[in-house]
Amino acid sequence: MQSSLRTLTVFSTFVLLMLSMQGSQLVAQESEGAGTNYAYIALDPDIITNYAGDNSKKLGYLRLTIEMMLDEPNYIGDIEHHMPLLRAVAIEVIGAKNEQQVKSLTGREELRREILKRFRDILTKETGAEVVKDIIFTKYLRQGG
Protein backbone atom coordinates (compact mmCIF):
# COMPACT_ATOMS: atom_id res chain seq x y z
CA MET A 1 0.00 0.00 0.00
CA GLN A 2 2.76 2.41 0.98
CA SER A 3 4.75 1.52 -2.14
CA SER A 4 1.79 2.18 -4.47
CA LEU A 5 1.08 5.50 -2.72
CA ARG A 6 4.73 6.55 -3.21
CA THR A 7 4.56 5.52 -6.88
CA LEU A 8 1.35 7.50 -7.35
CA THR A 9 2.93 10.57 -5.74
CA VAL A 10 6.03 10.32 -7.96
CA PHE A 11 3.86 9.82 -11.05
CA SER A 12 1.58 12.79 -10.28
CA THR A 13 4.64 14.98 -9.60
CA PHE A 14 6.06 13.92 -12.96
CA VAL A 15 2.78 14.69 -14.77
CA LEU A 16 2.54 18.13 -13.14
CA LEU A 17 6.15 18.85 -14.08
CA MET A 18 5.57 17.84 -17.70
CA LEU A 19 2.40 19.92 -17.94
CA SER A 20 4.10 22.98 -16.53
CA MET A 21 7.01 22.58 -18.97
CA GLN A 22 4.61 22.31 -21.91
CA GLY A 23 2.70 25.36 -20.71
CA SER A 24 5.86 27.46 -20.41
CA GLN A 25 6.97 26.37 -23.88
CA LEU A 26 3.57 27.36 -25.27
CA VAL A 27 3.77 30.80 -23.66
CA ALA A 28 7.31 31.25 -24.97
CA GLN A 29 6.21 30.29 -28.49
CA GLU A 30 3.26 32.68 -28.38
CA SER A 31 5.41 35.59 -27.21
CA GLU A 32 8.05 34.86 -29.86
CA GLY A 33 5.39 34.74 -32.56
CA ALA A 34 3.75 37.95 -31.47
CA GLY A 35 6.97 39.96 -31.41
CA THR A 36 5.53 42.45 -28.92
CA ASN A 37 5.65 42.63 -25.17
CA TYR A 38 2.52 44.39 -23.94
CA ALA A 39 2.26 45.88 -20.48
CA TYR A 40 -0.83 46.97 -18.56
CA ILE A 41 -1.19 49.77 -16.05
CA ALA A 42 -4.30 51.07 -14.32
CA LEU A 43 -5.31 54.64 -13.78
CA ASP A 44 -5.14 54.40 -10.02
CA PRO A 45 -7.25 55.07 -7.99
CA ASP A 46 -10.59 54.51 -9.73
CA ILE A 47 -12.18 57.53 -11.36
CA ILE A 48 -15.25 58.61 -9.44
CA THR A 49 -17.14 61.50 -10.97
CA ASN A 50 -20.56 62.85 -11.88
CA TYR A 51 -22.29 63.26 -15.21
CA ALA A 52 -25.33 65.33 -16.16
CA GLY A 53 -28.64 63.53 -15.81
CA ASP A 54 -31.59 64.14 -18.14
CA ASN A 55 -33.10 66.33 -15.46
CA SER A 56 -30.78 69.30 -14.92
CA LYS A 57 -31.38 69.08 -11.16
CA LYS A 58 -30.06 65.52 -10.93
CA LEU A 59 -26.53 64.29 -11.35
CA GLY A 60 -25.47 60.75 -12.10
CA TYR A 61 -22.53 59.01 -10.52
CA LEU A 62 -19.94 56.93 -12.35
CA ARG A 63 -17.11 54.85 -10.93
CA LEU A 64 -14.68 53.70 -13.59
CA THR A 65 -11.47 51.69 -13.64
CA ILE A 66 -9.35 52.22 -16.74
CA GLU A 67 -6.56 49.82 -17.64
CA MET A 68 -4.13 50.98 -20.32
CA MET A 69 -2.46 48.56 -22.71
CA LEU A 70 1.04 49.72 -23.59
CA ASP A 71 3.17 48.55 -26.52
CA GLU A 72 6.28 48.42 -24.33
CA PRO A 73 6.82 48.01 -20.57
CA ASN A 74 9.36 50.87 -20.82
CA TYR A 75 6.44 53.31 -21.13
CA ILE A 76 5.15 52.60 -17.61
CA GLY A 77 7.32 55.39 -16.19
CA ASP A 78 5.88 57.87 -18.69
CA ILE A 79 2.34 56.84 -17.79
CA GLU A 80 3.03 57.19 -14.07
CA HIS A 81 4.56 60.62 -14.63
CA HIS A 82 1.52 61.87 -16.61
CA MET A 83 -1.12 60.07 -14.49
CA PRO A 84 -2.65 63.30 -13.06
CA LEU A 85 -3.10 64.70 -16.56
CA LEU A 86 -4.66 61.47 -17.83
CA ARG A 87 -7.07 61.37 -14.87
CA ALA A 88 -8.10 64.98 -15.52
CA VAL A 89 -8.76 64.24 -19.19
CA ALA A 90 -10.87 61.16 -18.38
CA ILE A 91 -12.93 63.13 -15.84
CA GLU A 92 -13.40 65.95 -18.36
CA VAL A 93 -14.61 63.56 -21.07
CA ILE A 94 -17.02 61.78 -18.70
CA GLY A 95 -18.40 65.07 -17.36
CA ALA A 96 -19.33 66.18 -20.87
CA LYS A 97 -21.57 63.13 -21.41
CA ASN A 98 -25.28 62.98 -20.69
CA GLU A 99 -27.18 60.14 -19.05
CA GLN A 100 -28.09 58.34 -22.28
CA GLN A 101 -24.50 58.37 -23.46
CA VAL A 102 -23.29 56.92 -20.16
CA LYS A 103 -26.09 54.33 -19.85
CA SER A 104 -26.05 52.78 -23.31
CA LEU A 105 -23.54 50.19 -24.50
CA THR A 106 -22.81 52.16 -27.66
CA GLY A 107 -22.34 55.30 -25.57
CA ARG A 108 -19.93 53.43 -23.29
CA GLU A 109 -17.90 52.31 -26.32
CA GLU A 110 -17.88 55.88 -27.68
CA LEU A 111 -16.69 57.09 -24.28
CA ARG A 112 -13.89 54.49 -24.30
CA ARG A 113 -12.80 55.49 -27.81
CA GLU A 114 -12.87 59.20 -27.00
CA ILE A 115 -10.78 58.72 -23.84
CA LEU A 116 -8.34 56.54 -25.81
CA LYS A 117 -7.99 59.19 -28.52
CA ARG A 118 -7.41 61.95 -25.98
CA PHE A 119 -4.85 59.81 -24.09
CA ARG A 120 -2.99 59.11 -27.33
CA ASP A 121 -3.01 62.78 -28.35
CA ILE A 122 -1.71 63.98 -24.98
CA LEU A 123 0.96 61.32 -24.62
CA THR A 124 2.17 61.80 -28.19
CA LYS A 125 2.51 65.52 -27.48
CA GLU A 126 4.25 64.94 -24.13
CA THR A 127 6.50 61.97 -24.98
CA GLY A 128 6.79 62.00 -28.75
CA ALA A 129 5.50 58.43 -29.04
CA GLU A 130 2.10 56.76 -29.22
CA VAL A 131 2.39 55.10 -25.83
CA VAL A 132 -1.12 53.71 -25.29
CA LYS A 133 -2.22 50.94 -27.64
CA ASP A 134 -5.69 50.51 -26.12
CA ILE A 135 -7.71 51.04 -22.97
CA ILE A 136 -10.09 48.69 -21.19
CA PHE A 137 -12.83 49.52 -18.72
CA THR A 138 -12.50 46.85 -16.05
CA LYS A 139 -15.07 48.45 -13.78
CA TYR A 140 -18.03 50.54 -14.90
CA LEU A 141 -20.51 51.34 -12.15
CA ARG A 142 -23.24 53.87 -12.85
CA GLN A 143 -25.91 55.17 -10.54
CA GLY A 144 -28.62 57.81 -10.75
CA GLY A 145 -29.02 60.44 -13.36
Image (cartoon, rainbow, N blue to C red):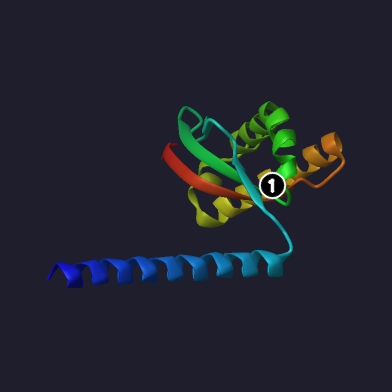
Element on which disc 1 rests: helix
Provide residue 83's location: percent of width, then percent of height: 67, 30
Q: Is residue 48 left or right of residue 88?
A: left
Provide residue 79's location: percent of width, then percent of height: 70, 36
Q: Report the number of discs.
A: 1
Q: Establish if 16 lies above or below 144.
A: below
Q: Is residue 127 left or right of residue 99?
A: right
Q: Establish if 137 lies above or below 47.
A: below
Provide residue 29's location: percent of width, then percent of height: 64, 70
Q: Identify residue type, mark 1.
A: Leu
Q: Residue furthest toward the left?
A: 1
At a point 57% along the width and 68% down the height, the residue shown is 25
At a point 44% along the width and 40% down the height, the residue shown is 142
Q: Establish if 95 lies above or below 113.
A: above
When asked about the image quadrant of residue 122, the answer is: top right
At a point 67% along the width and 53% down the height, the residue shown is 38
**Residue on which disc 1 sits:** 116
Q: Quadrant of the C terminus?
A: top left
Q: Is residue 101 left or right of residue 85?
A: left
Residues 13 and 143: in front is 13
Q: Establish if 116 lies above or below 86.
A: below
Q: Can residue 54 be seen here? A: no
Residues 39 and 103: in front is 39
Residues 26 and 17: in front is 17
Q: Can residue 38 be seen here? A: yes
Q: Quadrant of the N terminus?
A: bottom left
When asked about the image quadrant of residue 15, the answer is: bottom left
Provide residue 108's location: percent of width, then percent of height: 55, 50
- Label 1: few (<14), some (14–19) or many (≥20) C-alpha neighbours in 10 Å: some
